[in-house]
Image (spheres, rainbow, N blue to C red):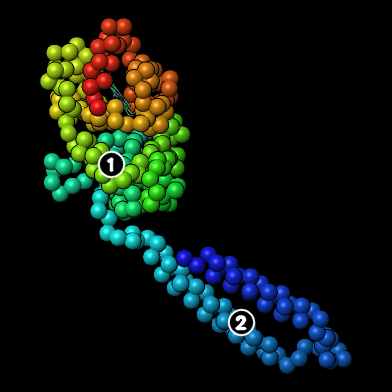
């Protein structure tokens, strides 16, 4: 896209022409002996018309040129093969992979996986206030507005982890609302996707666990674990919690220690967060940790 260079070049050229005309005007001497005598009225007016005409034509051409380029940029190079709906919450991201077959849809949070070299359509929604989705290396900012579905598409041509951030001030947790886009080979992406589609694996064994019961009592109102009775929607889906790189939209790296630290001190680690801090006994902590460790 040469739009930027074309605009800059033209601006410079026009500056030069204007400077040149100004200098000629300054240094050209009037021929009349009396400089105060105005020559026949209206004679200079035609130049105003000509000048305005030239400017209008140039600007009009530039508008068309810009719109054409913008239109090209706004479209993906290929029709997106994957559609993901990302919903902004105070202060985390719900990520839903769409599919025509309901059995192949799944929900995760704060981490988006995409195959390298493919364009992916992202539908952007908000559950509460205005947020904005921005992964600087992949695409521009797009607002997430309650009641509206905005769209953008992203494509990563190099594998890697691309960090994104909410860029619309949305309250106390705003600075702690980041996400990651993991771009990986098609095979790795398929593997990840198939794993995410599965319900939680160890649940049957876990049902006897006191950790499982504790989770159902204290956490299931806000969190879902597919394959169990936990169907809460106020917080991130935890079915494959341990597959994620970070906790709480980027606040902590996801390790077993950090996980229990988060549960005990969510309010301290992410002030204002919509998850309460839990005061649990030693035995409750180890039981809960055991249950959570099964959420691969
Ligand atoms: C009142 C609702 C609520 C309850 C109850 C609750 N949580 Fe949360 N939880 C949230 C919200 C909201 C978040 C997102 C916090 C953020 O990132 O701002 C969250 C985040 C988390 C995360 C981080 C998930 C991720 O992918 O980043 C974990 C793990 C978690 N909660 C575990 C638990 C456990 C275990 C319990 C029960 C002891 C529990 N939560 C109880 C609302 C709740
Ligand atoms: Cu924000």
Residue occupying image coordinates x 12% and y 20%: 204
Q: Please tell me in which quarter of the rendered image ligand 1 is found.
A: top left
Q: In the picture, residue 69 is in which quadrant? A: bottom left
Nearest to N terminus: mark 1 or mark 2: 2
The image shows residue 228 at horizontal and vertical percentages of 15, 25
Residue occupying image coordinates x 41% and y 36%: 178
Crowd around label 1: few <14 · some 14–19 · many ≥20 (10 Å) = some
Nearest the eye: 16 or 143: 16
Q: Is residue 192 visible?
A: yes
Residue occupying image coordinates x 43% and y 20%: 268
- Left or right: 110 with respect to 55? left
Label 1: which secondary element? helix
- Left or right: 49 with respect to 74? right
Q: Quadrant of the C terminus?
A: top left
Check disc 2 and report the residue beneath it.
Answer: 51
The image shows residue 189 at horizontal and vertical percentages of 27, 43
- Tell me the CA gap for discs 1 and 2: 61 Å
Check disc 1 and report the residue beneath it.
Answer: 188
Q: Is residue 232 visible?
A: no
Residue occupying image coordinates x 31% and y 6%: 282
């Amino acid at each position: 896209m040469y739009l930027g260079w074309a605009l800059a070049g033209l601006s410079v050229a026009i500056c030069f022409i204007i400077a040149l005309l100004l200098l000629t005007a300054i240094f050209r001497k009037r021929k009349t002996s009396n400089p105060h005598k105005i020559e026949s009225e209206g004679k200079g007016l035609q130049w105003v018309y000509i000048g305005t005409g030239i400017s209008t034509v140039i600007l009009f051409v530039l508008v068309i040129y810009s719109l054409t380029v913008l239109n090209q940029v706004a479209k993906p190079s290929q029709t997106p093969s994957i559609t993901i709906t990302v919903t902004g919450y105070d202060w985390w991201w719900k990520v839903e992979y769409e599919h025509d077959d309901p059995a192949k849809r799944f929900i995760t949070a704060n981490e988006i996986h995409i195959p390298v070299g493919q364009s992916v359509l992202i539908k952007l929604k908000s559950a509460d206030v205005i947020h904005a989705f921005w992964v600087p290396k992949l695409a521009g900012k797009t607002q997430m507005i309650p009641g509206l579905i905005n769209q953008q598409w992203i494509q990563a041509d190099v594998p890697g982890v691309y960090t994104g951030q909410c860029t619309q001030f949305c309250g106390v947790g705003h600075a702690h609302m980041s996400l990651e886009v993991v771009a990986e080979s098609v095979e790795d992406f398929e593997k990840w996707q198939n794993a995410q589609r599965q319900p939680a694996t160890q649940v049957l064994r876990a049902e006897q666990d006191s950790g499982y019961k504790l989770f159902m009592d204290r956490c299931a109102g806000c969190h879902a674990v597919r394959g169990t009775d936990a169907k809460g929607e106020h917080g991130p889906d935890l079915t494959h919690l341990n597959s994620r790189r970070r906790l709480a939209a980027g606040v902590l790296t996801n390790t077993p220690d950090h996980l229990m630290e988060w549960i005990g001190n969510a309010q301290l680690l992410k002030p204002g967060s919509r998850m309460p801090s839990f005061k649990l006994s030693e035995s409750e902590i180890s039981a809960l940790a055991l249950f959570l460790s099964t959420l691969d």
